[in-house]
Amino acid sequence: MQGVVIGLIHPGEMGAAIGALLSGRSREVLWASSGRSPETAQRAEAAGLIDVGSVQELARRSELVFSVCPPHAALDVARAVASAGFRGLYLDANAISPSTTRAVGDAVGAGGATFVDGGIVGSPPRVAGTTRLYLSGAAASRVAETFEGTELEPVVLADELGVASALKMAYAAWTKGSTALLLAALAAARADGVEHALRQEWELSQPGLLQRTERAAAAAATKGWRWVREMEEIADTLAASDLPDGFHRAAAEVFSRAGRDSSADAAEATLEFVLRNLAALQPR
């Protein structure tokens, strides 16, 4: 599949980086500008993507469609591509639960496409060794061929759909879930008047944790809106395995409100938000 035409939906920070590494290897990578923001258009142009205007045209010209979008939009994107008549390979690499993944697979499969489940772990792939694309499904190895030798390392897990998404959910349950926990812990200390003491204790007994908390708060203020549905998808994944899901539903609430704060001081604004709404962090 080295010469395959790829349709990319949508070129956000992660998607644009993936598009850039593919287009940089003389792959034809398409995107659809209809309804997208000027910022998205700038990212796509910088990544060397080819604008075909509409999802319908993207579906018509692509052999592989790669969906990298906020998790709340994953199913709608799949339905739109299916309704456009796409019958090639469809890769969903969004942060969604195995059950949502199967719904996406059903949607594109009903339109005649072949579905591959994906999960991305790591930062936008600009340097080799930082990012992995986990894949599952009967056609996973065909998709893996497209990314061989790129900065995005493909890892085929199994033929069963949902396996790659399950791995992504388990991984993010810790990475982003612990981010919410850190913010709540610091906010609780502030509420009880012991924030300064906690900061000092973290510096003594947990080197680097305070710096991580501040980075987490800044990230949550700008990206938290994307993480809301991801936390809900993780909660659904846990619930499906008869595991407690309350913490990640509370984490979704933290990120939901943190992402709405537009203060210039992102870290401080996020911590203030968590303090004001600490009661909302209790598991439902």
Image: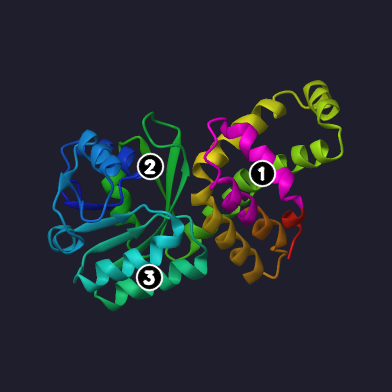
Judge whether residue 274 is colored magenta: yes
Left or right: where 36 falls relative to 272: left
The image position of residue 130, as x and y in percent, is 45, 33
Residue under numbered circle 2: 14
Local secondary structure at mark 2: helix
Left or right: where 118 falls relative to 237: left
Give the camera-side residue of 50 and 114.
50
Question: Quadrant of the image for the C terminus?
Answer: bottom right
Q: Mainly helix, strand or loop, the magenta region? A: helix
Extreme residue toward the bottom, this view: 110
Q: Is residue 58 visible?
A: yes
Q: Amino acid at mark 1?
A: Phe
Checking the image for residue 105, the label placed there is 3
Residue under numbered circle 1: 273
Residue at 66% across, 44% down: 273
Q: Amino acid at mark 2?
A: Met
Q: Is residue 200 above or below residue 62?
A: above
- Asked where in the image residue 80 lies, by quadrant, the reply is bottom left
The image position of residue 209, as x and y in percent, is 71, 29
Q: Which residues are magenta?
A: 252-278
Q: Is residue 277 above or below residue 113?
A: above
Q: Amino acid at mark 3?
A: Gly
Checking the image for residue 69, the label placed there is none
Of callouts 3 and 1, which one flags the residue occurring earlier in the amino acid sequence? Answer: 3
The span from disc 2 to disc 1 (Cα, nearest Å) is: 27 Å
Local secondary structure at mark 3: helix
Of callouts 3 and 2, which one flags the residue occurring earlier in the amino acid sequence? Answer: 2
Left or right: where 280 falls relative to 53: right
The span from disc 3 to disc 2 (Cα, nearest Å) is: 22 Å
